[in-house]
Image: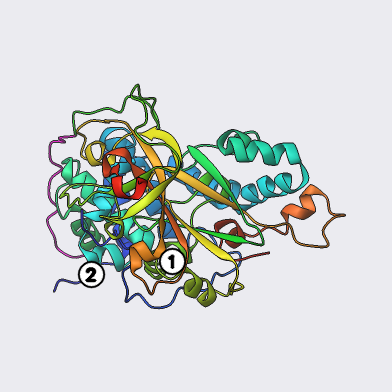
Amino acid sequence: MTERLSPADRTAALESLLVERELVDPSVMDGFIARYERDVGPMNGARVVARAWTDPSYLAWLRDDATAAIADLGFSGPQGEHMVALEQSDEVHHVVVCTLCSCYPWPVLGLPPSWYKDPAYRSRVVREPRAVLAEMGCSLPEDIAIEVWDSSAEVRYLVIPQRPAGTEDLGVDELAALVTRDAMVGVARL
Amino acid sequence: MDSIADMGGVLGYGPASRPVAGEPPFAAPWEGRAFALTLLTMGRISGRNLDAFRHALSRLHPLDYLSDGYYGRWLNAAELMLVDSAVLAPDAVNARVRRDRGEDVVEPAFPEPARPDYAPTGPGSLREVDEEALFTVADAVVTADAHPRGPSKLPAYLRRRRGTVTAVRPAHVLPDTHGVFAGENAQHVYTVGFDSTEVWGPDAEPFRLHADLFESYLTPDEEGAS
């Protein structure tokens, strides 16, 4: 078998070939990387959730047209063309996956974390979600119904966790700080 | 197509990993470079054709899909698309690596590019269609017994299954043709819900599973509707 070259070396080689061909500009690449390292991430989705918790008319909008409601906070673009909000409750727990690739709502959550891209998650959460969630540290009560959403087209799902008890006095910014990436995909509860 | 990318229900990958708080988007600098290169590459072939990129991912050898993780497979799929379009010669990337580390290799010449003669009719994947949606919420449907050689977004684990329409979504370009630069053929898309026992048999964990499926993957379930 031929030697497998390292992906770091192969990436550098591809970049140098495409720069030589004048097909990519390294400074444009730097901009893409910086955007997803700095500006786009789960802090965006957390703002959507905190506003839904505190503003009933916003929650109603999110239910009716999540794409527009989310765009109202400035979050739109690739991998967020058609957004749907899924609300956790005492009776139902939603969890999102992409079994065919690793589709993920970039504008509100940024790029997917390693566990979401892991074949172990992609393969089994559609087959034994309660067991998979328990492995990930999210053990659900027996009486809660599980709904799994396989993002197999261009619809992207944002899970709206339940507002934790005892947070009545917190403002929107403080509430947003409580919301985690994992809770907005449905592998954790707050 | 049946491929390493279509993972739903496959066993053998071990337990799911526990989330790590504050994980950065890129675990190493090369992952960010591979990410940005891939996005730019897609635009250099023919529009930003996500379906063609996903089809390239599904055509990778399983080792090339799995060995270097998510951005490793992005890199390999980007290279495959560039070779398909003759922007790069086969093995040009590996030859450049070996040259850069001082080996005595002859790099292949840049070929004459042969990009697909194809352009999307608009940005993104959503389109307006004139045809009325065939199905509505609560309709009983059966998924196709489809085994295409080309792209498809019907997961293998959801072939020949009976479900119920959960929601009607906006129409999308059809990956089966768009992904091979053969036409957008926009279609209605439905979220379809399935009982876990319909998919995984009578001993399955009880839960409800939803997937987003193109209209041509579905037919009415006359029996389920009665």
Mark 1 falls on what kind of element? loop
Q: Is residue A182 magenta?
A: no
Mark 2 falls on what kind of element? loop
**Residue A79: where, in percent of width, then height?**
46, 43
Pointer 1: what residue? A125
Mark with earlier residue (2, 1): 2
Pointer 2: what residue? A4
* Amino acid, disc 2: Arg
The magenta stretch spans which residues?
Answer: B102-115
**Residue B211: where, in percent of width, then height?**
40, 51
Q: Nearer the viewer, residue B56 or A125?
A: A125
Question: Which dot marks residue B47?
Answer: none
Q: Magenta part mainly helix, strand or loop?
A: loop
How far apart are the alpha carbons under marks 2 and 1?
A: 31 Å
Q: Nearer the viewer, residue A52 or B47?
A: A52
Q: For the point 40% across and 32% down, which residue is it?
A: B126
Q: Is residue B88 above or below residue B197?
A: above
Q: For the point 43% across and 44% down, which residue is it?
A: A29
Q: Label 2: chain?
A: A
Residue that extends furthest to the right in the rendered view of this protein? A169
Q: Is residue B106 magenta?
A: yes
**Residue B188: where, in percent of width, then height?**
36, 34
**Residue A125: where, in percent of width, then height?**
43, 66
In the image: residue A87, left or right of residue A115: right
Q: For the point 43% across and 58% down, which residue is it?
A: B209
